[in-house]
Amino acid sequence: MREGRSEALTPRAITAYLDRYIVGQRDAKRAVAIALRNRIRRLELPEDVAREIAPKNILMVGPTGVGKTEIARRLSQLVSAPFIKVEATKYTEVGYVGRDVESMIRDLVERSVQMVKQRKIEEVREEAASRAREKILDALIPPVRVQEKVSDFMHLFTGQQTAKEERLPAEEEEKAEKQRLSTRERLARMLDEGRLEAREVEIEVSESPQFGIPIMGGPGMEEMGINLGEMLSGMIPKKKKRRSVTIAAAREILEAEEAEKLVDHEAAAQEGLAKAQEEGIVFIDELDKVASAGSGHSGPDVSREGVQRDLLSIVEGCTVNTRYGPARTDHILFIAAGAFHKLKPSDLVPELQGRFPLRVELGPLGEEDLARILVEPEHSLVDQYKALLSTEDVALTFSEEAIKVIASLAAKMNRETEDIGARRLHTMMENLLEEIQFDAPELSGQGVEIDEGLVRERLEKLVADTDVRKYLL
């Protein structure tokens, strides 16, 4: 597995993948690619050496809308390592109402365990499908049951034998069994050919009792609530319930149930815990929002600094109690990001600054960058609108000059109002194509070209009207 990952996740391959979706920001892509590659390199080292190599955490600094969050989002799709993205603003200092920073590690471990379970379920998918098939056939052609003859109703009150077993003669029983097997084989062929998918069948499924027990308290108490529910569900046996569903639905239900039985959940939990500790990646967005401008402020700033100090212990390396056992954070990679347009990274507490040794600046997007973002990335904004309107049989096309003008007007609005980067393009495109999207059903079968003249007609007034711009992104 590691050899495959070593071949696939080279720094050059990682940056090439990010280039498919994100324009520019070469330094940030390279820093992230090297950090990910070093994770793989460390796993190849002897344990005593690997234990000493700490991850080089990254701080990405740049205005909003330039690609910080998009880099994180695309990374989560690329790496098979446990990955979570969190917002620094949703955490509070211990003692305040809200989530404590340790919950991000519990979330990471939970994600890791689910990843491992999902992989193990895929590994047993074939066996689970075979078992589900047999259960469906049993439901369609049940085994020959011993017939029972109930005696007189009054025997229920006499204490005498109330039912007597009556077996068929051996020859008839053998004949009935052969007929059943023949019918079963015929149904099995039809089932494999997909000819019975819409047919209804009655199956028996397990129902786990659900316990919602909210527990209020200090850090980690929500985990106790989860464990209490699991403990109680383990004490009370699962109920069996009969459901009448189509064979297509029955196959899905039974395959999931059989796969769950085949997976060793305890082993998966321990593997997921180890994977989170060794390969986990946490992306902390909006870090600048918990920075403090100075000691002259009071109130919320106290809590902000408290969040930083709580975060410091996590990034430095500590043990966090999770429902699967204690998790060490020493080798988890932290990537933080923030605009820092009002504050500076130096406004963070010095100890936290030192825990993010790699600092990468993402530059603002210019006119040329915005034009490239419109058309170059895979599933670009222009491609998205073309695809949406193609469902109405409307062929939408953009001239090169139209793309340049859209980018130019977006860049102008970013300069003269708040700079929100590439997000400005969403507003421009919606305003440009509003009428076409509304009339699309009536334009079915036609081609619509967006040229420079149409762009200027629709958008120049919007850009020039300062009163309207106050209420638009």
Image (cartoon, rainbow, N blue to C red):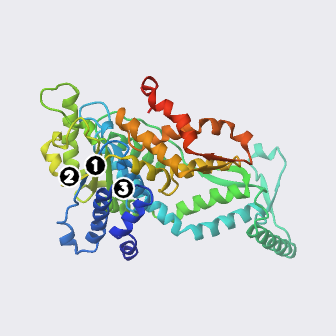
Return the residue at label 1. Answer: 336
Label 2 crowding class (10 Å Cα cut-off): few <14, some 14-19, many 20+?
A: some
Q: Which residue is drawn at 41% across and 52% down?
A: 73
Return the residue at label 3. Answer: 24
Measured as percent of width and height from the top left, residue 394 is found at 69, 48
Query: Residues at badges 1 and 2 in contact (C-beta under 8 Å)?
Result: yes
- Residue type, mark 2 in image: Phe
Label 1 crowding class (10 Å Cα cut-off): few <14, some 14-19, many 20+?
A: many
Regarding mark 1 in the picture, which secondary structure is present there?
strand
- Residue type, mark 1 in image: Ala
Residue 170 vs 319, above or below: the answer is below
Q: Which of 229 and 17 is in front in this view?
A: 17
Q: Residue at x 48, y 43 (%)?
A: 406
- For this orientation, the residue located farthest to the front is 453
Examine the rendering and report whether any part of residue 64 can be seen: yes
Residue 311 vs 186, above or below: the answer is above
Q: Disc 2 to disc 3, how far (Cα)?
A: 23 Å
Image quadrant assignment for residue 267: bottom left
Measured as percent of width and height from the top left, residue 228 is found at 40, 43
Label 3 crowding class (10 Å Cα cut-off): few <14, some 14-19, many 20+?
A: some
Measured as percent of width and height from the top left, residue 314 is found at 23, 49
Measured as percent of width and height from the top left, residue 396 is found at 63, 49
Return the residue at label 2. Answer: 356
